[in-house]
Amino acid sequence: MCPRLRRRSVTVLLLGVGVGVTAGCGPDPIPGTEVGESAHFRFFIDPDRADDLSADPQGTKRLAELETDFADKRTMLGTPDGRKIDYHLLTPAHVAAVCGFTEFSTSDGESACFLEDQMAIAAAYVPHQHELIHAYMTLVAPGSRPVPFLVEGIAEAIGCSRPGIDRTWQVAWQQATIGTAADPDEYVYSEGGLFARTLIRTQGIDAYLRYFRQAPARRDWALFAANFSAFWGMSLDDAWTAMHTVSPGDSETDVEICPCSLAPAPTDGRPITNDRAKHPYWTLPDTFGSSVAVTVPSGDLVWLQDCAGIAPEIRTFYTGSPVGAPVVAEGVVAIVEVPDARPRYLLPPIGTLSVGRFLADDCAAAEPYALSENFLGGGHLWILANQTTAAARTTHATLQVSVATKVATETGYRATICNGCAFDQGSCPVELSRSLNPGPVPIAPGTLNVEFVLARSWLWAGLPTQAIGDLMFGN
């Protein structure tokens, strides 16, 4: 009987050494018809995915997404032109059959595999970044087949959408380096990804690729350690300790490295067209010390991630939308103080993006930010300010309100609303706090000067740079 893997992702080698495939056993033939071709891909659609076939009969949109991914990752990997990659969009059940997985592992649609001998990816969505990295590495390092710890590690190291791992949790390197793709995630995938990312960040991608090409294929931890030491000039014990050490200012959660080669989001405040084929993410332009105001649809998150994957994430809470409430394109506004000049990116959809001094320690210095009429009918404003000490942080915003509405707060921090900037004279008409006066209270059209007294966010341990407050608008 052929084994059925319970892995979500794996490289299947039918020629030579196999991963999870025993002699005489192999995956089922890949179903589907080729519908389109581009410079680096051929695209196939499963006949059981009739809706996808009718929506994109020639695979134009999906091929554009794949070519964008190829170009983006090429800026890091230097991927050469060569044999085209066959990308098969399948049902989860057919992914299981082709890849040799159990049905259990396909329940969320994440399962996929790369069939190296066919230069083919079988996946239930486009683009599957992990499997694409496997394909790119076949072009970058032809004939190289190091241990699964390195093969799966590099596929986990580069991308722009997946959640991170706890950097402080670890297994012994002797376990991880001799693991297989069928082992628990933390052995080969999590530790392998962190290992690759750490070497790329500290030694550079070119040096890492040279290391990958010469690394041993035999799963022997003593051989692996000796090869590592000979190549890098340091012990594996020291490297393992370093990769699990959190440096000051970094997050305990380590995230994949995003190339961040795509164009920055427009900053003129006009509606942004979110075409994922061209922009699976938006890079954040240089704010030159100013704050950035981002709008997203109702119920969504504003989420800024570090391109290198090591700085604390900057994001709003998820609050959802009331049942039956209309989804407003700019239903969430986040005004963010970006803490430093590290390159960052945002995931779509984004409604608008503006750069200005929208938050200031001095009320009179805050640049006005106009809230749209649609937003005022039922929107959520988040303030994400820099926080470097345990003391409360006070900051100011000037908001332009075009129609009468009501305002409330949810986070528990204090927001005082004034017609001017005399916050210390006791004459401000509205002071909001979740415990004393959460609202809602009516406000008239005009200019609102708001003083936020913010405490450090308690929801994210290890994120000492973020303080958060909010205002909710609507009648």
Image (cartoon, rainbow, N blue to C red):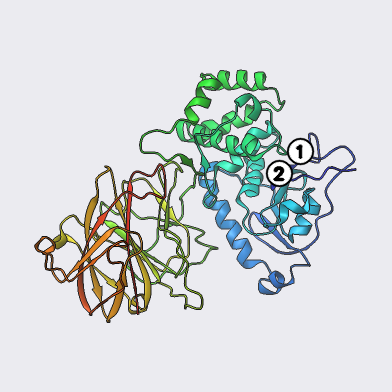
Q: In which quarter of the image is the C terminus?
A: bottom left
Of the residues shown, which amino acid type is indicated by label 2? Val
| Secondary element at image label 1 | loop
Q: In this view, does 366 lie to the left or right of 38?
A: left
> What residue does disc 1 label?
19
Q: Which of the image's four quarters has the N terminus?
A: top right
**Cα gap from disc 2 to disc 1, whole angstroms:** 8 Å
User: Which of the labelled discs sits on residue 147, or is there none?
Assistant: none
Q: What residue type is labelled 1?
A: Val
N-terminal label among 2 and 1: 2
Q: What element carries label 2?
A: strand
| Front residue of this view, candidates 230 and 375 | 375
Q: Which of 168 and 458 is in front in this view?
A: 458
Viewer can see residue 122: no
In the drawing, what numbered circle is on residue 10? 2
Q: Residue at x 29, y 47 (%)?
A: 387
